Image (cartoon, rainbow, N blue to C red):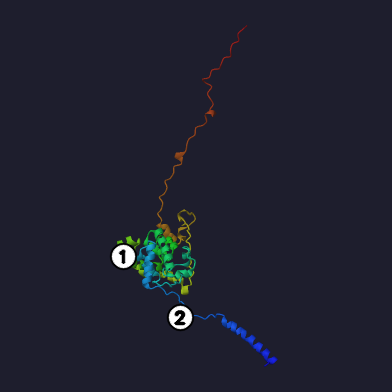
Amino acid sequence: MLLHPLSISQTLIAILLLLPIWSFAAEPVDVPAPAASIQSPAPSPSRAELNAMVDHTAQTHGLDRDLVHALIRAESAYNPQAVSPAGALGLMQVMPATAADYGVNRAEALFEPATNLNTGMRHFKRLLNKYNNIGAAVMAYNAGEGALERGGGVVSYAETQRYTHQVLLAYLKSKGIAPYSPDARAATGIDLKPEMATASVPASRRSSAGIAGVAKPPAAPDPLQTFEPEPDLRWQPTFKQPELKPALRAQLAAKPHLPAAPELNVAALRMRIPEPQYLMQPSSRGFQRRQPPRQIAD
């Protein structure tokens, strides 16, 4: 039986249309993985794991673990994601600019506990070696080395005073040392005082800030007091006593009067100058006329 020409062409067209479908079906197709197989970010370490990391890193850098724990407790309360208003990051609240000095150029890396602990302890170790004083190193870690040096070894900022008291108090308690004793002074290098815990900005500095942080203009300085010499009325020959003002009269009366100078006898000081000798005419008496020499005859 012969096919109709039209049916043959239709058959060829149908075959050509079916070929791409077969080829596509043979290629592998990417099927998305189920949601349960996608790995989530690593969870934050537990407190026990953080304590172990702190102890190990402190031992690596030769630091007292009790001092480092007191520092971290005051800085971030063991929060690896802590961020301060000034921009300090992580467990030890390391500034990105400070971290760059130790080779950490990504701020995000400071949220990693291992990186943050290593960087913060390297910086704290350098401060301890520089000042050889725990109290000074704690103050410099909080306020900066410049503030410590400008204050002559003590930072008077209220925030730094409270921070230093918190860190050193926890450190001394871990060592069994009374906070305000001579032993505490020997251990920390500074005099820890109870008033440091409640330090605040002085009222004078708070008032100078004004409302909403707008600084008031400084008060005008006191006018300079010019010196005017006091006139000595005793040596003015033209004044008349009745014309003096009462204030000047009282001032003149209060001044001690100088004793009168003794009179000078000028006549007694005069010298009698003798007349010049060359003006006196010598007497002719006593002089002998000289005889002329006799002439000798030849």
Q: Amino acid at mark 1?
A: Lys
- On residue 175, which mark appears? 1
Q: Secondary structure at mark 1?
A: helix
Report the residue at 47% width, 74% height from top.
Answer: 212
Q: Secondary structure at mark 2?
A: helix
User: Above or below — where is 235 with respect to 288?
Assistant: below
Front residue of this view, candidates 147 and 132? 132
Tag 2: amino acid: Ala
| Image location of residue 158, percent across then percent down | 40, 68
Residue 119: which quarter of the image? bottom left
User: Residue lying furthest top in this view?
Assistant: 298
Is residue 252 visible from the viewing direction of this image?
Answer: yes
Quarter of the image for residue 295 reads top right
Compared with 27, 283 (above or below) is above
Q: Quadrant of the N terminus?
A: bottom right
- For label 2, count other residues whose C-alpha is less than 10 Å away and answer few (under 14), some (14-19) or many (20+): few
Residue 245 in picture, x, y percent from top left: 45, 62
Q: Name the image quarter holding residue 111.
A: bottom left
Residue named by callout 2:
36
Number of residues whose C-alpha sits closer than 10 Å to that of mark 1, classed few (under 14), some (14–19) or many (20 or more): few
Instruction: Please state the horizontal and vertical placement of residue 223, each as a whole percent of the image.
Output: 48, 64
